Image (cartoon, grey):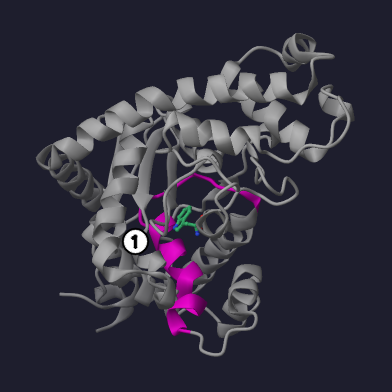
């Protein structure tokens, strides 16, 4: 076949007026307040101005096989998806689905693997951190960012809202796409990372100098508020949050633990920080913590109620996820067809 006989490579389809947004979370353990304030809540806030695709990345959870429990993985993926919806993602406005329900992700990842230099993956900070001190390292862990690139590129994504720790993976995604374009022609939209403003970075309650994390929360009960915690547990975690021995409640002067509490309060309350500072000025940290407990309990109550409804009706959740996967597949299959045509595989 001469080049002129080759099937035309489909161009990127016309874009709608709203930017396409893609993001995802691993179903590795229960979601916590940091996941809600730093990600979910912002996804919900932007959902009508943007064209959203939100994924539960269960295949990524397999990259540390020691850490997953096969008996619970499927249930946890459903639970995280239910939490997306319970947090306010509208399944009409946003496409919500589980990664492994859309086989195009793994197929695209293979095609991207073949254009990704090994050195690029070995240099990833997260890979180095996750493998540090480990004897046995699965190939999946090295390849993790290529699967992530497939997630993003399949949906013609413009923006990827993520934490600072993921920016390197989004840059790698662009690099892989650009390299693919050089080798085979233009088929992808180049995405960019969007890191939320500082207020959204929630720190560990027991250690306010590290970001609130799912893996630490599994080991240390006072580390996080989980989104499904009952009011008593929320109260206990917040009332025992680490502060300091002063009475400083002005954000700029406060210690990291107090800043973290003020941040949580401000984001959920919505009033300006100065007003909140004045409300607890001179009253000590007990008053601040009580205010934070109240606002967190209030914010989580409706989410927990909606989550319970979804859990009580597995057929509804199944139907929502099946519809989400079908919608996702519409876009993913079209992109994958362009990729396959460009490299010369497929029927
Ligand atoms: N690596 C991301 C994290 O741990 C999860 C993820 C997988 C993701 N695929 C993605 C995030 C695509 C954004 C876009 O947070």
Q: Report helix, strand or loop for mark 1.
A: helix
Q: Is residue 256 magenta?
A: no
In the image, which residues are magenta? 138-164
The image shows residue 219 at horizontal and vertical percentages of 54, 60
The image shows residue 80 at horizontal and vertical percentages of 34, 47
Up-down relation of residue 59 to residue 87 (above or below): below
In the rendered structure, the answer to whether residue 271 lies left or right of residue 153 reads: right
Up-down relation of residue 49 to residue 164 (above or below): above
Specify the quadrant of the image occupied by residue 125.
bottom right
Q: Nearer the viewer, residue 274 or 23?
A: 274
What residue occupies the far left of the structure in this picture? Answer: 315
The image shows residue 72 at horizontal and vertical percentages of 28, 62
Q: Nearer the viewer, residue 251 or 99?
A: 251
Q: How many marks?
A: 1
Name the residue rendered at 63%, 56% in the picture: 165
What residue occupies the far bottom of the structure in this picture? Answer: 135
Specify the quadrant of the image occupied by residue 246.
top right
Q: Nearer the viewer, residue 225 or 192?
A: 225
In the rendered structure, the answer to whether residue 331 lies left or right of residue 181 reads: left
On the question of residue 284 being in view, the answer is: yes
In the picture of the structure, the residue carrying the numbered disc 1 is 58
The image shows residue 49 at horizontal and vertical percentages of 44, 25
On the question of residue 91 being in view, the answer is: no
In the rendered structure, the answer to whether residue 321 lies left or right of residue 45 reads: left
Name the residue rendered at 64%, 32% in the picture: 239
Specify the quadrant of the image occupied by residue 302.
top left
């Amino acid at each position: 076949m001469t080049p002129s006989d080759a099937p035309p490579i489909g161009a990127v389809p016309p874009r709608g007026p709203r930017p396409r947004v893609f993001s995802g979370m691993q179903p590795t353990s229960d979601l916590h307040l940091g996941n809600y304030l730093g990600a979910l809540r912002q996804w919900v806030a932007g959902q009508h101005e943007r064209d959203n695709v939100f994924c539960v990345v269960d295949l990524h959870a397999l990259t540390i096989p020691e850490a997953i429990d096969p008996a619970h993985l499927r249930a946890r993926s459903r639970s995280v998806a239910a939490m997306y919806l319970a947090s306010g993602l509208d399944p009409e406005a946003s496409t919500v689905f589980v990664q492994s329900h859309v086989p195009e992700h793994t197929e695209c990842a293979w095609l991207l693997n073949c254009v990704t230099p090994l050195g690029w993956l070995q240099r990833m900070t997260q890979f180095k951190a996750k493998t540090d001190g480990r004897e046995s390292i699965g190939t999946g862990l090295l390849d993790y960012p290529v699967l992530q690139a497939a997630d993003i590129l399949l949906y013609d994504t413009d923006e990827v809202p993520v934490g600072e720790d993921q920016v390197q993976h989004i840059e790698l995604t662009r690099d892989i796409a650009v390299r693919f374009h050089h080798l085979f022609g233009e088929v992808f939209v180049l995405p960019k990372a969007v890191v939320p403003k500082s207020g959204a970075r929630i720190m560990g309650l027991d250690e306010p100098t590290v970001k609130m994390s799912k893996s630490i929360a599994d080991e240390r009960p006072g580390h996080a508020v989980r989104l499904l915690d009952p009011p008593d547990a929320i109260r206990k975690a917040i009332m025992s949050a680490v502060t300091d021995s002063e009475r400083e409640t002005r954000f700029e002067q406060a210690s990291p633990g107090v800043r973290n509490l003020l941040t949580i309060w401000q984001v959920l309350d919505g009033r300006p920080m100065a007003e909140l500072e004045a409300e607890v000025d001179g009253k000590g940290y007990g008053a601040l913590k009580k205010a934070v407990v109240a606002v967190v309990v209030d914010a989580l109550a409706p989410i927990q109620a909606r989550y319970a409804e979804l859990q009580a009706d597995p057929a509804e959740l199944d139907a929502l996820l099946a519809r989400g996967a079908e919608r996702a597949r519409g876009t993913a299959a079209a992109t994958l067809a362009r990729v396959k045509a460009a490299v010369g595989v497929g029927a």
